[in-house]
Image (spheres, grey):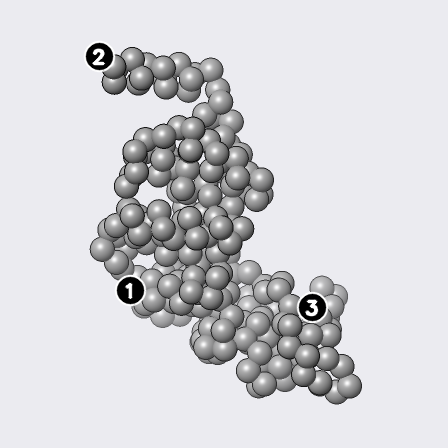
Amino acid sequence: MNKFLIFSLLLTLNLSASQEQSQGKTQRNFFDDGHKAFNEHKYEKSKEIWSELCDKKDGKSCTNLGHLYDNGLGFAPDIQKAIEFYEKGCEYGDGLGCSNLGVTYFRGDGVDVDFKKASEYFSKGCELNHGFSCVNLGYLYENGDGVKQNYAKAFEFYQKACEYGDGEGCTNLGTLYVNGFGVDVNFTKASEHFAKGCDLQHELGCKYETKLKSDEFKKFEEEQKNKATK
């Protein structure tokens, strides 16, 4: 089964829990104002709000600024500015900022392709409990990109991602069990992980779970069991 590293540079949706005051409002509410402006396509206003909070070392706001520059929302795209703010977001403890940097180096967006740097940023994001960073780090270990191939490590990071609520991590665990990469082939465990991935809105998890339940696959599974007993 094929798996893909999904390069989605997402807008941070988690809210800062900080309660510092900013112009008479809590920092969290001020952060929300940035989202409200974003949803209304008032990108200059979002930029103004998140710039002020980023200057106060709010990592999520810095990452969101990177997203605006990366996608040219409200002004011309500027990948170097995007990288600058992703770096700040990561430095200030936002896992998505680290993840977006990892994706940037994996793809070579405005920088040379560097799998080693990508792995370092995904690792930092994963340490910050960012599930998508853990998925991507597991992908690198499974395929030996920027790190020595290690299925046990891939399993470890997919498992973390799944525990953090990332459906792709659950689905990828299932594929390890189907293919016997670093673990014994176990279709029951594979199905359980595909189901969890599906529950977490990962489309391939749903597809693979359905596949394992098909009559065609059940016939294949029975044939494999008969071969093993001979």
- SS for tag 2? loop
Distance of label 3 from label 2 (alpha carbons): 62 Å
- SS for tag 1? helix
Distance of label 2 from label 1 (alpha carbons): 45 Å
Nearest the viewer among 125 and 18 is 18
Q: Position of residue 77 (x, y in %)?
A: 53, 71
Nearest the viewer among 21 and 105 is 21
Nearest the viewer among 143 and 67 is 143
Q: Quarter holding the N terminus?
A: top left
Q: Position of residue 163 (x, y in %)?
A: 49, 50
Q: As displayed, is residue 10 above or below residue 206?
A: below
Q: Earlier in the sequence, mark 2 or mark 1?
A: 1
Residues packed near mark 1 inside 10 Å, few (<14), some (14 to 19) or many (20 plus): some
Q: Nearer the viewer, mark 3 or mark 2?
A: 2
- SS for tag 3? helix
Q: Which residue does the image show at 46% across and 73% down from the upper left?
A: 90
Q: Position of residue 95 (x, y in %)?
A: 49, 66
Q: As displayed, is residue 102 above or below residue 199?
A: below
Identify residue type, mark 1. Lys
Identify residue type, mark 2. Lys
Q: Earlier in the sequence, mark 3 or mark 1?
A: 3
Instruction: Inspect this view and state whether residue 185 appears.
Output: yes
Task: Point out which mark residue 150 bears.
Answer: none
Residues packed near mark 2 inside 10 Å, few (<14), some (14 to 19) or many (20 plus): few
Report if the CB atoms under discs 3 and 1 are less than 8 Å apart: no
Task: Point out which mark residue 116 bears.
Answer: 1
Identify residue type, mark 3. His
Q: Position of residue 123 (x, y in %)?
A: 37, 63
Report which residue position mark 2 lands on: 230
Report which residue position mark 3 lands on: 35
